[in-house]
Amino acid sequence: MGRELKKGTKGPNSKYITRTKAIRKLQISLNDFRRLCILKGIVPREPPSRKKANHGNTAPTSFYHVKDITYLAHEPIIAKLREHKIFLRRMSRAMGKQEWGRAKALEESRPRYTLDHIVKERYPTFIDALRDIDDALCCVVLGASLSQHRRIPKADLDDCARLAAEWQLYVTHTRSLRKSFLSIKGVYYQAEVQGENVTWVEPYQFLQKIPMDVDFRVMRSFLEFYKTLLGFVFYKLYTDAGLVYPPPLDVKKEAAGSGVDAYRLQPVGGAPVDQEETKTTGKKKVELGGGKVLTGRQVQKAIVSMEVDGEETEEVEGNPKDVAAPLATAKAVPTSTQALDTDTLPSTEEFIAQPSKTDPSTSSTLLTLHALANLPNSNTKLFEPYVFFVSRESPRHILEFVIRSFGGVVGWPASCGGGSPIESEDDERVTHVIIDRPLPEGGVLSEGRRRRKYVQPQWVVDSVNAGKVLLEDAYAQGRTLPPHLSPFGAEGEGAYDPLAPVPGMEEALREVDEEMEDDEEDSEDDDDMEMEEEKEEEKTKKRHRRGKKAAASAVNVSNPTDADAVRKAELEAERLGIEPAEFDKVLEKAAKNKNRDVEEEEGDDEDDEEPKKIETTKGASEENMAKMLLSSKKRKLYNLMKRTNARKEEEKVKLQKKKIEIAKQKKKSGR
Amino acid sequence: MAPKLPASSKGFQRPAKRKAESEPEAGRVEPSEEWTGFGGEGEGIEMASDEEDTGESAESSDVEEFPEIEAASSEEGGEDEDTSEAGSEEEDISAEDEEEEDGESAQEEDEIEPPPGDSALMGEGLKWDRKPGSYPDPKVIKSSITGEGKKVYPPIEPEYDSDSSTEDDPNRVGRIPMHWYDDLPHIGYDINGKRILRPAKGDELDKFLAAVEDPTSWLSGFDHTSQKDTQLTEEELDLIRRLQDAEVPDASYNPYEDTVEWFTGEGKQEIMPLTARPEPKSRWQPSKWEKQKILKIVRLIRAGHIVPNKPKAKQPQWYSLWSTEAETSRPPPLVAPKVPLPKHAESYNPPEEYLPDQDEIDKYEDLSDDEKVKKYLPKKYDALRHVPAYEHFIHERQNRLLDLYLAPRIRRVKLHINPDSMLPSLPSPQSLRPFPVFEALKMSGGGGSRARCVSVSPDGVWTVSGDEDGVVRLRETFVGREAARWKLGKRIGAVEWCPRKDVSYFLVGIEDEIFAFMPPHLSPAMESATLDVLVPRSPPPPIGEDGEKPVKWSQESLSFKQSASTFSSPLLVVTLPPTAGLPKQITFHRRGDYFATVSSAEGHNAIWIHQASKRHSQSPFKKIKGSIQRVLFHPNKPHFFVATQRYVSIYDLSAQKLLKTLYTGSRWISSMDIHPTGDHLIVGGYDKKLMWFDLDLGNKPYKVLRYHTKAIRSVAFSPNYPLFASSSDDGTIQIFHARVYSDLMTDALIVPLKVLRGHVVLEGLGVMELKWTTGLGTCWLVSAGADGEVRVWCN
């Protein structure tokens, strides 16, 4: 017999403690605990049984795992936090006693901590970090858009702005932007960096109204961590791209309001890159010590020749050795800071699958880099041939970023900030002007206006999402824009797709057509009557139309071949004063329509509907039978899934119906 | 006088004494008859009165002005020589002491010469002036030995130095309750042990006269110690007045005294340092060890090991963090799920079908903020420049951050399956034929009263049904022709056909009685065999003792047997005890000799087991808990199933013990049937459940099926096909395929096959009972409904 265990000391539920206990164990304040949890990424855990974990108490509390708390207890930052507390106390005492010298000395030796090790712990590899920077980017971008606030230090906002600009610069430089979406919440961007999709949202540039109930302490704790994380991630990204991080800031340009351009990309060990040059020339040139200029192609060739040398085939074009010699010195210099030039890839880099002779069925073909680069929607040179000018009412920061990420050159008026490569709209090079104004009334198109395209901002984003340059006409200035769709796809499989054809749309339109035809015919008849009796105008016309309608409807509703119904309709027509000839006409038409309907119905009935109905009822009953045999848990799950699917389907059908309605109305009003 | 003042309270004394130290004795001029001369009290009173008198007597006011001198002079003049001597001596000692001494000398009246023995002891014959409450100062005399001056302290005199304020009270009994002396002529003892006689106490008239005569009588109070009225002194009256006015009781206390400057002002500054000790060496000489340490640092600085004010080596803020391996082996925290990506509806220019119509907008606006699943409504803007800032942007970001650190992270497997794939794959019903699929016959029973019960003859030819009007109908199963009818006039609870093949009769249960009937048109051999069973020529001898038996068996007379109407009246009647009530169920043992009846009564009368051949009935249970719903004989073992409201108990009849109790989980069992192999049991409940028990497995159901929408009324296994059926109050009959395997490893296969509809639900009752036919190679089903119809369902 062992000693009797105390209740609640064993089992899975004993491994969880409440937050209060955790705080007591760590001997820190609640605020410090929160901060620590945010920094270390410790989140509450859900115990198997809340009641057991809290010793029978069912009050709502959050639980932490004991191991998590022990892990926190070993965090060196806790000691720093305590030191900081002491520092604050000493500082306040020194300030209170007006001992300025002492305060200064204290301030100089103020305890500081870094979060480097936490970044490393939370993200053991770079790719882990890269996968998780979405939130960090969103946070930083939001911070960059905030104006000053008393609860957020200016330094934080500046850091946010810097990081946001650095990220934008990197994405532009590597042309890794893939998708963009103008939503009512802000602009969504998706970039593909090292094979990972990074999505972030940027608010429209307005003065953000900061609500009262925002917990800035939490925000700042997160921001503190995100700043460190992004710093290291950017360092790695920039270094991998052969750039210096952090990019130096051009103060003059910043003062001029050139935005992202104020930061200059600088290759490692080289002079700052002029972005405009690289963009306009397109190809990368490497300058060597001897004043020789090498193109990317030459470098490639040199590499190939070096490889070939080893295999003793000296048959190479040109003089590769001359190139290779200085290349040895140039190796340290990064060769390409651009996106991969797929055109220049030599054929030797092609992987050729060698199928097995014994087992020809298993042919494993891997995706090669070449193939990957040629995938659709990775057309990063979309706007390379074009030069854009963003007029002042269009959002420059959005368009500048998107267009540059796809190789275009952007200019803007001086009122939007300095540093524009193109001074004015009338520049010869400008091919597209992005304008968000209605057409001026009675304006005369100038010569320049005719030569270049005037498009609305949505055209840029839609082109990017489509992966091709769309026709500008639909997006021309003053035109009603086509709907802007999300590039991130619909809500899931089987959800409503606005581009897909809607079943029943054609029929509905045809119906509308027919109705219109009828109306037209009616109006023609009216015209005839008017010709005959010009004086009796509106009253009779109205009456007649009404009468005909009534007759037609009466006949339509009942069977036109049914004698009773016809008789009734005739009487009605007579009462309204309709000519018998006219009535016959209407009747004929009604009969025709009816016949067609009947035919259709019959066809449907015979072919599809009846067996379908039977099948559905049969299927339903069988399904119900089988459902009986499920356990109650599974049956609940089954019912839930069925319900969810039904709800989705219902939403889809609702949208489809709406679409048909809208199309019908448009058609009606269009005529 | 109401307040009785304690004659010798210390509360009065203390302030008075203090006063006495600094003020001269002015009270002395006052005539005080009451003066008793004992210590503190006298003093206190006198001192207090001194203040009182300042305004009254010029003499005393003079005294006030120059207290020291006046007091000293007056005392010196007025008192004996001792004090004058003391005063002169004091002057000799020092100028500083003078003030105090003079103050002290005010108490000369108290001074008593030290006894000669004492002075002899001191040897010097010195005299000290004593003040009560303070110790006299020492006197400096020249030592005879050293020739130096030395201080001589006065001897301690207990009389004066101890606080014995009550010592001079004439009555020395102390502070005891004085009523102890109430019956005695005296009131205590004086210091010499002599009795102090009680002072004379006049009668009320005397008192009155005294009060009238004595103008000060209102100032007097009764003193318990002396047992007589004592007049309050002026001081005491003043004290009372002060207490009433909430003033400081001590008259001498001045709350607004002038500040006395001790250390400030001309000539009063303290001369520092206070001590004349020479400065320690460490104050002005540099430390050797410090010097050594400093030298060491200097040496290090010179050597360049220490660089003063060196800027801290700046580590680069950013570096290649991931170039080294991670230090901790702890797995990184779970990555939070990403925010769902925006859909078409979020576009600033969505397709028009996404825009809400007026109804949807109203509905959305009616919702509270918490109820809103989405914080926005799709909206269309005709140009990008018209798009405003999104008002919830910061909130959404904050909520995301809160989620990131407050929400527990659980990895959940999301099912991306077609829900239909969860359904078990069952064999097609077509492959499990035959089973009843359609209604072949409908036999309505004229009156429209409910058909309660139905039974089919073992050869399948006859169907007998009983309805609530008390009519038993015998019909041909194949054609539905009614062959015979018995009107019994009472409610019929159950009918059951005897399973024996060689005889043909059935039992009908009505109130308290069970009738046995024989169908018509039997072959002669069978008829005679049946009659032998029901109406034997020689009835079997009664079993057991001859006493009155609760169940009576009676049969028709033999002569009646020969008549043509053999079947028109019951051939055998079993009369149950009168309290038994309506037999709800009759069930035969497989052999057909034993049958059991379940009555609606509570207690042991509910179940009776009858033996037809021996005309014997017995109640197997003396005491039964709960109401019995159904009973059953095991097909091939001597086991007996009893279904109470919630449980099914299995008894061994031969061993007479309980084998097992099955926990059905149903709240009210309605019906029960056993599989022909005897290994499986189905139980139907009024709570719509059907429980399948594998009797080898345990006491919990192997499967619980819930598919009827109303209470289950009847369940039945097909005797020769792997089928079972259940009927319910929802008017349906459901047919199941139930294949059981002989090996114990394979579970029974249950496949729902068919729902038979046809019976009409009347007053919430549907199909009351169903029975399978046997013997014809068919699997037909006969059902009796609450609509009064009996239907036959064919395959």
Image (cartoon, coloured by chain):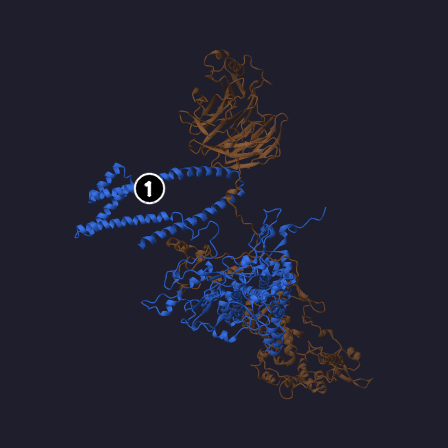
Mark 1, residues whose alpha carbon is within 10 Å: few (<14), some, or many (≥20)?
Answer: few
Check the image and report above or below for A50 versus A100. Answer: above
Task: State the count of labels.
Answer: 1
Residue B439 falls in which quadrant of the image?
top left
Q: Is residue A105 left or right of residue B712?
A: right
Name the one closer to the observer, A263 or B312. A263
Name the one closer to the observer, B482 or B654. B482
Residue B493 visible to the viewer: no
Q: Amino acid at mark 1?
A: Asp
Percent of width and height locating residue A638:
51, 44
Give the quadrant of the C terminus of chain A. bottom left
Specify the chain shown as blue: A
Specify the chain shown as brown: B
Percent of width and height locating residue B162:
71, 73
Residue A561 falls in which quadrant of the image?
top left
Task: Kindly identify which residue carries mark 1.
Answer: A597
Name the chain under label 1. A
Check the image and report above or below for A316 versus A524. Answer: below
Residue A596 visible to the viewer: yes
Secondary-structure class at tag 1: helix
Q: Is residue A541 left or right of residue B635?
A: left
